[in-house]
Amino acid sequence: MLFRLPKQPNRIIINGEVWIAPTAVIIGGIKIDNQSRIGYNSVLRGDLNQISIGCLTSIDDECYIETGINSGVTIGNGVKIGYNVTLNCCLIQDGVFIGDGAIVQKGACIEEDSIIKPGTIIYEGQHIPARAIVEGSPASVSRYLTNEEISQKQKYWHNLENRLLNYYEATKNKDQVMAL
C-alpha cells in the first residue's frame, strides 16, 4: 500500500556559527542555532518533520536523531548529548546532559537541567521532571540536583562555552565552521 506523506520543510537553517563534522549527515528540515556542534558520523533526519537545535548545544559523535510524520525533535539551549545517543521525536529542554549510549524514545520529554546517565532508556511518552538525575532501563529518577549542584553545572557549562568560543575563533578560516 502506498500513501503520500505530508510535505515537510526540508531546508537547513543555520543561525550564526556552528561546527558540523565533515562526516555528519544532515537531512531535511533542520534548524541549528549559534555556537552549536554536530559530531562525526552523527545523523540528523529531519526528512519527516523539523529538528530544532538551540544555541551552545553539543551533539557528540555517532548520534542518531530522527523525526516522525506527526512530531519533530526539539533540543534546547546549552544541551550536552554524549556519544552514540539516539533521540526519536522528543523534547529536550535547556541545560540537559544526556550520557553516552542513552536512548530517548518517541514522545518523551526531559525538563531543564536534568542529567540522563549513560545507557539509560527513556521510554515512549515518559516525562522526566526538571533537575532529575535519571538512570536505568526503564529510566527512573535516582535523585534531584541541589541548588549548589546546579550552580556547579552552570559554571562547568560557562567554561565549556568559553572553550567552544575559542575553538570557533581558531577554526574561523577552515571549512568546518559554517556561517550565514
Image: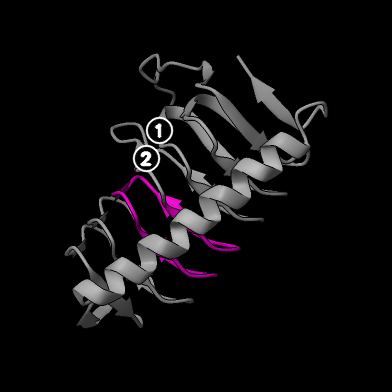
In the displayed structure, would residue 40 be above or below residue 134?
A: above
Q: Given this view, does label 1 or label 2 mark the residue nearer the observer?
A: 1
Q: How many labels were placed on the picture?
A: 2
CA gap, disc 1 and disc 2:
6 Å
Residue farthest along the right direction in this orientation = 174
Query: Which numbered tag is attached to residue 95?
Result: none
Tell me what residue is drawn at x 50 percent, y 21 percent: 15
Q: Position of residue 4 (x, y in %)?
A: 40, 17
Tell me what residue is drawn at x 45 percent, y 54 percent: 158
Sequence-first tag of 1 and 2: 1
Query: Which numbered tag is attached to residue 73?
Result: 2
Q: Residues within 10 Å of mark 2 (few under 14, many from 20)?
A: many
Q: Position of residue 146 (x, y in %)?
A: 20, 77
**Occupied quadrant, residue 18:** top right
- In this view of the protein, can residue 60 be seen by the observer? yes
- Give the extent of the magenta segment: 79-105
Q: Which residue is mark 1?
A: 52
Callout 1 amino acid: Ser
In the displayed structure, would residue 130 be above or below residue 148?
A: above
Query: Colour scheme of this structure image?
Result: one colour
- The reply to whether discs 1 and 2 touch (Cβ–Cβ < 8 Å) is yes
Callout 2 amino acid: Val
For the residue labelled by badge 1, is the local secondary structure a helix, a strand or a loop?
strand
As for residue 89 lying within the magenta part, the answer is yes
* Placement of the N terminus among the 4 image quadrants: top left
Tell me what residue is drawn at x 71 percent, y 35 percent: 169
